[in-house]
Structure formats: structure tokens, C-alpha cells
Image: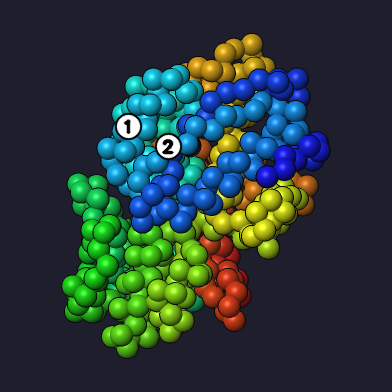
């Protein structure tokens, strides 16, 4: 990939004498390079590599990505990767699978590596952990308020809601309990709340339980695209057309069409912080989209966008440390710089010359501002039916 040697990035970021020109720093990047989620790894890596090239070309620090494999949610692989990076003094890291299902979190604190998870966020079980921040909405908690508003305004037939998620051990009980509370607090009936092993491909038992519960909407959270598509394919066989699916994971149309087929997508909607470069509203978002298309000959995904801007966020922390005359090779100083003002430019949202914003809550360590929405497919294109921010603020019906 050719580096961006222009100063265009400087229109959106502060490229100054503290930007780190001429210096290098290791950046840990732990991705699902093998296993069921391996298709996502290239999207994440592309975002990192594009940001690295643009920063270098614009006269800033040159990150040296150190790639490790979490094997798509293998806890031991995540532990080993964290140890390898920590022992070599890596000060910052990008992770996925909610820091590999929580297994990396202790090591992140032990080795003092400022870490962002732009794939899974913090989830409900990895909040407030030292040095670890989720760089996307909490799935599914942050989408509930906006989703419930949409149900009431656009899907008034929905009265009873079921929830399907992966079985991730003790944290799953907490997730299902919190979803029941959120659903009932919003005035709906909480129907079947079921889980499935991440390796499962047969959802017949879960479908029977959902059917018998009387649910007329199902929220699917945490599952990856392949798992959701398999569920949808089996659910379509039941002939039920009245169920609205709201998924809170990444959306790759090819996977759904290949695994589930178009008939299974009739009432399927997905909801999360979805990046659509074709409708980017800020110059920064459009710049990223065009640069990504030029470099990889394809459109960026949400994972590409997340790992792109997260790489820039960590660089901004380096710049802040340099500005104070500190040592950016120390994760403790990067963390202090991050927490001093946890607000950064984003390719999401914004308008024209005004960039979007991603901000973080220093208590929960999750995002406090992150544009999200509910989307569906019409005539082969993804369209928004509602948009909102964290906690359902700025809710708007579209389409």
C-alpha cells in the first residue's frame, strides 16, 4: 500500500512539532487471524495499516504494528499474545473479541498497555478495567434505548421480545439478566432468553424455545455474522414472518446471502455503530473512505473504520505525551494523556469540515458518544431506518 505523503490528514488531526516525526513505537494488534472470525482480521488490519501509512506520510510517529493471533476467541491465545507484547515493553495495543473474552484484561493491567477494543467494546463484563477501554458501543446495552423507541414508533405490533446470545460462561447470566430488566423497564414482555455455544451451528433447540415463548421480536447480540446467518436460515424454515431481528454485530451482506439466503432476511434488521462510507457526513469520513478504496479496492467496513480511528486515537495520546515532555514508550503516560481528555476525532458522524467525535466514559471505560442506528436492506442496499447515539439520545426515524 502506498503511504499518503500529503498533509491532508493534518486538516483533521493536529500534526505539529509534537507529532513524533522520525520516531517509531511498537503497537500491539491482536486479531482473529485464524479460526471462525478470520475473515474479519483483514478488515481490522487494513484499517491499522492505512492509519500507520497516513500518519507517517503526514509527518507523524511511525507505529510498528506487532500482530498476534487470538484464534477467534481462544483465551489462552490471548493470554500468550498479551504476555509476548508486555514482555517486550509494548506501550499500547488494539484488541478484539472484548480483549479475547476477558482473558487479556489482567495482562493488559499487569504490563500497563493502553488498550482499545474496537471490535467488541467492553461488553458488560470488562468495564472499568485498568488500561482497557472499549471503542464502540456496549452490545447490547447501548442499543436498547434506541431500539425500543423504534419498536414503539415503527413496529407497534412488537409486544414480547426474546434474546439470543453466545454462552460465554458466567458473564452470559449477567447479560441475559440485564436484557430482561431493560426489556421489561421499556414496557415490553421479556420472552425466551437463550444462549448458544460460539461453536454451535444448530439452533433448533433455541428456535423451539423462542417460538413457544410467544415472542414477536428477537434481539440477537454478540454472535458473529456466520452464526447469525445460520440462525436466520433455520428460523426462516418455520415460516414466521412477524419477527423483527435486531442484531448487534458486524454486517457483511455476502455472508448473509451465502449462508442464509435472501428469504431469511425479510424481516432482518441490524443495529450497532455501523459505518457506511458511501453516506459519510464529514470530510474526515469521506477522506478515510476514499483513501481506503484507493488502497484496497473495496469499501471500508465498520471494523476497518474502528481500527483506523483507534490507531489515530492512540497516536494522539503519543502526541499529548510529547507535548508535555514525557515518554510515550510508557503505557502509564499514554493512559494519563488519554484520560486527561477522552475525546477524539471520529470518522463517524460530523458534518462537512466538522469531524465526528468519539468520547469515552472514564468510569465505565466504554464510549459515551458514538453514533449508531438500525439498518435493513432494500433493493440490495443497506439503508438506515433509525439513527441515535448512546442511550438513545438524538433518536430519529429515517426512511
Figure quadrant of residue 249: bottom left
- The answer to which of 320 and 287 lies nearer the viewer is 287
Badge 2 density bin: few <14, some 14–19, many ≥20, Cα 10 Å? many
Residue situated furthest top in the rendering: 325
Q: Indicate which disc, 1 or 2, sits on the residue closer to the N terminus.
A: 2
Badge 1 density bin: few <14, some 14–19, many ≥20, Cα 10 Å? some
Label 1: which secondary element: helix
Q: Position of residue 147 (x, y in %)?
A: 44, 65
Q: Quadrant of the C terminus?
A: bottom right
At a point 46% along the width and 56% down the height, the residue shown is 39
Compared with 323, 355 (above or below) is below
At a point 47% along the width and 23% down the height, the residue shown is 90
Q: Position of residue 331 (x, y in %)?
A: 48, 21
Drawn side of residue 221 relative to residue 50, left or right: left
Figure quadrant of residue 106: top left
Compared with 94, 279 (above or below) is below
At a point 23% along the width and 55% down the height, the residue shown is 167
Asked if residue 121 shows in the view, the reply is no
Residue situated furthest bottom in the rendering: 239
Residue 80 numbered tag: 1
Residue 68 numbered tag: 2
- The answer to which of 185 and 75 lies nearer the viewer is 75
Compared with 83, 220 (above or below) is below
Label 2: which secondary element: strand
Q: Position of residue 158 (x, y in %)?
A: 37, 77
Q: Position of residue 257 (x, y in %)?
A: 47, 75
Amino acid at each position: 500500500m502506498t503511504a499518503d505523503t500529503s498533509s491532508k490528514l493534518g486538516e483533521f488531526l493536529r500534526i505539529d512539532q509534537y507529532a513524533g516525526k522520525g520516531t517509531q513505537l511498537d503497537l500491539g494488534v491482536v486479531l482473529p487471524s485464524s479460526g471462525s472470525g478470520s475473515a474479519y482480521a483483514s478488515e481490522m488490519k487494513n484499517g491499522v495499516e492505512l492509519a500507520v501509512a497516513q500518519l507517517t506520510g503526514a509527518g507523524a510517529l511511525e507505529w510498528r504494528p506487532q500482530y498476534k493471533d487470538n484464534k477467534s476467541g481462544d483465551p489462552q491465545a490471548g493470554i500468550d499474545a498479551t504476555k509476548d507484547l508486555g514482555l517486550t515493553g509494548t506501550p499500547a495495543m488494539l484488541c478484539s473479541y472484548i480483549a479475547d473474552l476477558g482473558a487479556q484484561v489482567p495482562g493488559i493491567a499487569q504490563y500497563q498497555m493502553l488498550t482499545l477494543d474496537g471490535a467488541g467494546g467492553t461488553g458488560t463484563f470488562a468495564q472499568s478495567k485498568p488500561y482497557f477501554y472499549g471503542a464502540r458501543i456496549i452490545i447490547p446495552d447501548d442499543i436498547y434505548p434506541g431500539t425500543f423507541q423504534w419498536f414503539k414508533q415503527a413496529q407497534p405490533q412488537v409486544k414480547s421480545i426474546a434474546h439470543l446470545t453466545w454462552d460465554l460462561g458466567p458473564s452470559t447470566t449477567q447479560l441475559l439478566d440485564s436484557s430482561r430488566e431493560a426489556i421489561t423497564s421499556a414496557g415490553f414482555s421479556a420472552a425466551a432468553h437463550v444462549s448458544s455455544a460460539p461453536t454451535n451451528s444448530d439452533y433448533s433447540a433455541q428456535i423451539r424455545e423462542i417460538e413457544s415463548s410467544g415472542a414477536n421480536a428477537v434481539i440477537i447480540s454478540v454472535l458473529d455474522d456466520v452464526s447469525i446467518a445460520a440462525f436466520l436460515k433455520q428460523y426462516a424454515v418455520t415460516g414466521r414472518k412477524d419477527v423483527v431481528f435486531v442484531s448487534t454485530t458486524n454486517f457483511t451482506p455476502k455472508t448473509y446471502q451465502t449462508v442464509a439466503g435472501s428469504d431469511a432476511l425479510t424481516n432482518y434488521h441490524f443495529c450497532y455503530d455501523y459505518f457506511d462510507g458511501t453516506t459519510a457526513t464529514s470530510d474526515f469520513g469521506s477522506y478515510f473512505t476514499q483513501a481506503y478504496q484507493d488502497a484496497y479496492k473495496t469499501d471500508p467496513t465498520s471494523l476497518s473504520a474502528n481500527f483506523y480511528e483507534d490507531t489515530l486515537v492512540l497516536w494522539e495520546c503519543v502526541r499529548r505525551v510529547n507535548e508535555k515532555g514525557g515518554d510515550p514508550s510508557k503505557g502509564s503516560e499514554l493512559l494519563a494523556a488519554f484520560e486527561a481528555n477522552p475525546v477524539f476525532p471520529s470518522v463517524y458522524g460530523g458534518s462537512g469540515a466538522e469531524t465526528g467525535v468519539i468520547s469515552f466514559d472514564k468510569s465505565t471505560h466504554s464510549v459515551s458518544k458514538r453514533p449508531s442506528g438500525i439498518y435493513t436492506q432494500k433493493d440490495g442496499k443497506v439503508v438506515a431506518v433509525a439513527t441515535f447515539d448512546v442511550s438513545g439520545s438524538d433518536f430519529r426515524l429515517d426512511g
